[in-house]
Amino acid sequence: MKYISVVLRSVLIISLFSVIVKGITSHEKPEPSGQTLKAIKDCITSSPDPWPEQWKKEYIDTISNAVESHRNASHYALRLEILRKGFVPYWRSFIKTPERSLFELHCARIRWYIEHLMVSEFPSEQERQKLRDQYTDIWDYAAGSLLVQFPFLDPNTVEAAKADDLSICYRKIDAPLMPVYLKPMSEEEVEQIKQCWDNLRYARIDLWRRLGGGLKTLSEKNNTKATSNEHDYELTKESLSQLLGLVWKVVPQRPDYYLNALENRNKALKYRLQLKRQARNCVKLAQTR
């Protein structure tokens, strides 16, 4: 009887120890989705922004729901790693204001990005390299056409601006949270982007003028090489920023919930503009009395 009691006590101790060890292991190594959501929450809560706490919670819940609803996705852990790596630069990249319509648009956008990431065919390294090559080809084409359109630009400065722009694209291809960095384009789509770029030549002339091109406001003494290079770099970077908008045109169809949020945002902007016009008209009317 005493022997049986000792055995039972040993079994109980082993069982309790097993539970404790399991609990510690689980605590030390949370599941991938928990790790990802914690990193995202830390990022959101550590950076200052005008969103109230309830909005931040709603935004995090949007991300959590999108992640949890795709637990059966292939390469689930790798997709979560892409989300974790890609979220921080994405969070820092967009403007946050206390406008509800803009906040709802941001919620719809991050939901779209995550759902697209989770359901899309996972890219191989070969496909990622092809996308890098396509971005390089498009940006090389654009930089070359800039030198033709604006022959006064310094080629070395244009090359430097292009390299800086491409380095950002390469980093986002390595962590493709956004659809434009996830998979290669077709050759037809690449040519379409180049054609659209050519069609924007007059818009780039307007940009050149807005940046002070053609204005002889500087004396020959002050018109230094450094000043010229800064202007060339700015014009090149601003011009190349048009490219990403063209790439976005060939991504998959945007979901309805995103289009609805975008429509609501546009309505809010139009309404705000209408109020400003009415206010100006009231001021003018008061001044004439």
Image (cartoon, grey):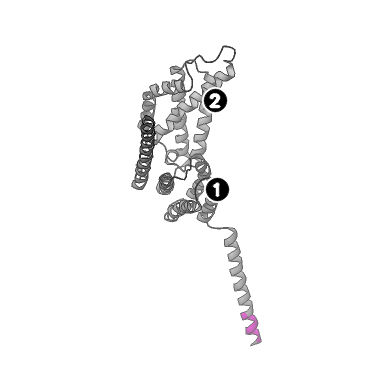
For residue 259, which numbered disc appears in the image?
none
Instruction: Write the start and end of the magenta stretch as one range.
Output: 2-8
Report the Cα–Cα distance between label 2 and label 1. 31 Å
Left or right side of 10 for 187: left
Question: Between tags 2 and 1, which lies in front?
Answer: 1
Residue 199, visible in the rendered structure? yes
Q: In this rendering, does residue 249 appear at all? A: no
Q: Which residue is mark 1?
A: 43
Q: Residue at x 37, y 39 (%)?
A: 275
Q: Which residue is mark 2?
A: 160
Residue 37 lies, in percent from the top left, at 51, 53
Q: Where, by quadrant of the figure, is residue 248 drawn? A: top left
- Residue 247: where, in percent of width, then height? 40, 34
Which residue is at the far top?
220
Closer to the camera in the image, 183 or 278: 278
Quadrant of res 131: top left
Please report whichever mark, 2 or 1, sits nearer to the chain's N-terminal start: 1
Location of the C terminus by quadrant is: top left
Residue 15 vertical placement versus 268 (above, below): below
Q: Amino acid at mark 1?
A: Cys
Say which of 246 and 50 sits in front: 50
Q: Position of residue 162 (x, y in %)?
A: 50, 27
Task: Write the residue at 55% across / 20% down.
Answer: 229
Residue drawn at x 43%, y 18% is 149
In terms of secondary structure, what is the magenta stretch mainly? helix
Query: SS at mark 1?
Result: helix
Q: What is the total number of numbered labels drawn onto the structure image?
A: 2
